Image (spheres, helix red, strand yellow):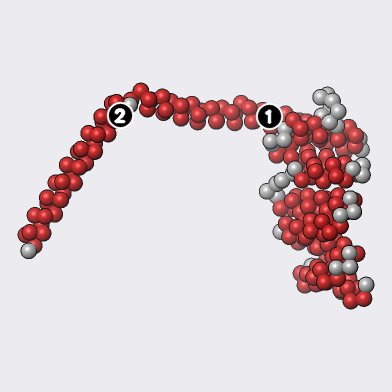
Amino acid sequence: MAKLTNEQEGKETVEFFKDLDREALNTERFIEKYSKPLAVVFGLLVLGVLGFFGYKQFVVAPKNVEAVKSFLAAQKNLAEGKDKEALGGKSAANPGFLGTYDEYSGTAIGELSAYNAGLLKFKEGKFQEAYDLLDKFSSDNKTLMAMKYGAMADAKSGLNKNDEALQLLDKAASASDDPYTTYYFTRKAGILALGLKKNADAKKYFATIDEKYQDYDNGMSDSYIEMTKYY
C-alpha cells in the first residue's frame, strides 16, 4: 500500500512540473506576443510615478513656500493691528488671509488662512461669512479643531442660532485632549445651555467639570449646578 502511495505521489509530482512547464511556455508566448503593449504600459507606469514625484518636488513644494510667505505677511499686519490689511482679499499686492486662502486652498497654510480670515470676519460682525470661512479649516491638531468649533459656535450665536451653537460647543468640548481646552468649552456649553433653559444639559456639563476639572474651576461648577435647580 505504501509503495502504491509513493508511486501515485511521484506521478502527481511529474504532472505538477509538466503543468509548470506548460504555464511557463504560455507566459513566454504571451510576453513575446504582447511585448510592445506591455512595454508601453510599463513606460506609462514609470512616467506616472516620476510625474507624481516631480509634481511634489517642483509644483507643490514651491507653492507651499509662496503660501507661507503670503501668510506671514498677513500675520505681520495682524500683529501690528492692521486688521483690514491682514484680512486682504482686495488686491494681488496684498492678498492677506483671504487672498492666501483663495490662492492656496489646497495647502495647510491656505486652510489656516481661512481660519484667521474667519476670526477677522467675526470681529467685523459678519457672522455668516465668518462661519463659512471657519468651516473650511481642518487640522490633525485636536486643540486647533476645538478652537475652530468654538469660534463657529460664536458665529452661530451671533446669528441667533443658539441651539446650533450649543451643538458646536459640545463638539469643541470633546475635540481636544488638552484638559484646559476641554474645561473651557464644557463650561461655555453649560452656560449657554443654562441660558436656553436646557437645565438637564447644563447640569451634565457642570457635573463633568465638577468631576474632572475642579482645578480650573475654583468650585464655580457647584454654584452652576445649584442654578440648574431653580433658574
Residue marked by disc 2: 31
Residue name at image x 91 percent, y 73 percent? 227
Image spot of residue 183 (x, y percent): 80, 62
Residue name at image x 67 percent, y 28 percent? 62
Dot 1 lies on which element? helix
Of callouts 1 and 2, which one flags the residue occurring earlier in the amino acid sequence? 2
Residue sitting nearer the eye, 219 or 60: 60
Disc 2 marks which amino acid?
Ile
Dot 2 lies on which element? helix
**Quadrant, the N terminus:** bottom left
What is the C-alpha distance between the residues marked 1 and 2? 43 Å
Q: As displayed, is residue 102 above or below residue 187?
A: above
Residue marked by disc 1: 63
**Quadrant, the C terminus:** bottom right
Dot label at residue 154: none
Residue name at image x 90 percent, y 34 percent? 84
Q: As displayed, is residue 4 above or below residue 69?
A: below
Q: As displayed, is residue 55 above or below residue 145?
A: above
The answer to which image quadrant residue 33 occupies is top left
Q: Residues within 10 Å of mark 1 (few under 14, many from 20)?
A: some
Disc 1 marks which amino acid?
Lys
The answer to which image quadrant residue 230 occupies is bottom right
The answer to which image quadrant residue 125 occupies is top right
